[in-house]
Amino acid sequence: MSDRSFLPTQFDAVIVGAGFAGMYMLHRLRGLGLAAVVFEAGGDVGGTWYWNRYPGARCDVESMQYSFSFDSELQQHWRWSEHYAAQPEILAYAQHVAERLDLRRDIHFETRVESSHFDERTNRWTVRSSKGGVVSAQFCIMATGCLSTAKVPDLPGLKSFTGQTFHTGAWPHEGVDFTGQRVGVIGTGSSGIQAIPVIAQQAAHLTVFQRTPNYSIPAQNRPMPPEYEQSWKAEYAERRRQSWTMRSGILYNLNDKPAMDATEDERQREFERRWQGGGIQFMSSFNDLILSKAANDTAAEFVRAKIRSIVRDPAVADLLSPKDYPIGTKRICVDTDYYATYNRDNVTLVDINAAPITAITPTGLQAGGRDHTLDSIVFATGFDAITGTLLAMDIQGRGGQSLRAAWADGPRSYLGLMVAGFPNLFTITGPGSPSVLSNMLGSIEQHVDWIADCLGYLQARGAASIEATDAAQDDWGAEVTEAGNRTLYPQTKSWYAGANIAGKPRVFMPYIGGVPAYRQKCAEVAADGYTGFRIGDGAAAQVQPPSMVQV
Ligand code: FAD
Ligand code: NAP
């Protein structure tokens, strides 16, 4: 088809989103011989790495693991320049994959899906885009991401600000030059903690507005050691398999000993060794850090002591030290020079927990009755995570029931893959799956493979539909909640539980039972003929549309 602005209306599958999930899904569906199309709101592939171009953005799962495993030649040939690659390199990787697999010809960019409605007569989804186009497909696969709806807080006076505002999750492609500026950063989660040290080096003055301090571990990032890269490439397939046996889906050395069985001296040595090693594996110093408050306290206090040793001003160090929640129960942060940045003369920390921001003004913002004059404001205020992007669309299933209504009290899903009442609709890394608690690339591949295998099964059987049963969904929901309750996570207000969004139901959304248990469950369900799913026989009817429609 020469004119890409016209598409046939009938597809086997529509995929929404062209991040790593949508890209791999398209590849797998092509392999099944299915006609698939992708709609992507952004201008190119990459998802997270297309949008989050803020200074300092990089992965915190090491690059040898934060990469696709399905293409052996790709993982042998691709070379990461650093232990933790920066955003431009991860985006370049996504673009390379798109070229290698010739994906772009089936992706429509700058096309946002606004609604998707299920027709029970035909067992097909009607998908409408922001460009007014309508397509019909038997399957609708949401590859819309867990962290893809950036949230700017609704602060009074926001529109009156005469300087520039930015959100880390929608950063300008041309970059931002803060030279000579008074910059304010609101938010000290993973994004803020990565951006703050870099912005501080450029701005005339940086004011950080902190509501809740976070625990952050140094990345100890470094150029990729060639021998390390080689060690991975020599046994890539085996190491990937091993990673699936890890709770987080990330291969590293888990200490299988409880913290409280170690002496104080042993604990300190282990924490120090992990701190020097860098990154999120700090939380694997002992096997009970997320299970036992006493164990967790020892790790939390170790990090607080580190903060006191790095930050010269004791009052600032105290303010930066989390005290009210267990370490790791908000997503642990990974940084480069974060705490040391507060020793700079041009950086000020403002506690907006004690004295909240009351207004944005034309020249800056007001907090605690004080005016802060700013040229630019950076919102590092996070995302409406896991459900926000799905609920931003008008999704209607059986009987016209909306997903918003079905999830009014929090998301309900079978395995994070399908929702009862929404046949033929799949969610990649949906709520109730390990998703954000794991190496997301591994979890994406596992979901995509499961969905592709399922569609192959339906194809072979000539089935028209598949749908999660209410009973299976309820049982799985109970398991997700129980798994969460076995840990310290529910004690903390976090985006994992929707606590960062006003009015969002407080439900711990990801499945924390671990990647191995989850993978086994998914595999068993498939091997047993998709237990917990209802399969409807008879081919999906084709509706009679005009032969082409503009998208
Ligand atoms: P995304 O990459 O979010 O892609 C979803 C795509 O769907 C987006 O491009 C979006 O534009 C599109 N979309 C959404 N709604 C619509 C719609 N209605 N119509 C059309 N298109 C739509 N995970 C890790 O495991 N390790 C890390 O180190 C790590 N670092 C991260 C760093 C940052 C800054 C952030 C924000 C997240 C990070 N994550 C990390 C999580 C990351 O989101 C995943 O690793 C992964 O990139 C998600 O891929 P995805 O394809 O599922 O979703
Ligand atoms: P986040 O973790 O939700 O952090 C948002 C920050 O903004 C928090 O400090 C929050 O304070 C603050 N905030 C939100 N609304 C506010 C308001 N109205 N007023 C004042 N402060 C407000 O978001 P994020 O930093 O973008 O990270 C989200 C997730 O993306 C991470 O947890 C991680 O999974 C992923 N990520 C990973 C990396 C990486 O290292 N690879 C980098 C960036 C992001 P409270 O805590 O008080 O709510």
Image: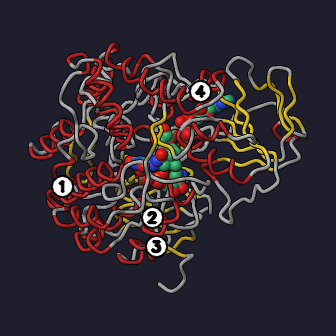
SS for dot 3: strand
Is the CB–ligand 2 distance for label 4 below 8 Å? no
Which one is earlier in the sequence, the residue at label 2 or at label 3? 3
The earlier-in-sequence mark between 1 and 2 is 2
- Residue that carries the numbered disc 1 in the rendered image: 239
Comes first in the chain, label 2 or label 4: 2
- Hey, which quadrant is residue 278 in on the image? top left
Residue with the mark numbered 3: 8
Q: Amino acid at mark 3?
A: Pro
535 on left or right of 364: left
Where disc 1 sits, the SS reads: helix
Front position among marks 2 and 4: 4
Q: Secondary structure at mark 4?
A: helix
Which of pointers 1 and 4 lies earlier in the amino acid sequence?
Answer: 1
Q: Position of residue 361 (x, y in %)?
A: 88, 35
Per the model, the C-alpha gap separating discs 1 and 3 is 43 Å
Q: Nearer the viewer, residue 381 or 346?
A: 346
From the top left corner, tell me how far across and down residue 267 is, in percent: 29, 24
Kindly identify the amino acid type of the residue bearing the numbered disc 4.
Answer: Leu
Look at mark 4 in the image and give the residue it sits on: 320
Q: Which one is earlier in the sequence, the residue at label 1 or at label 3?
A: 3
Residue furthest out toward the left? 528
Q: Residues within 10 Å of mark 3 (few under 14, many from 20)?
A: some
**Along the viewing direction, whichever of 228 and 85 lies nearer the viewer:** 228
Q: CA distance from mark 2 to mark 4?
A: 43 Å
Q: Residue at x 26, y 28 (%)?
A: 286
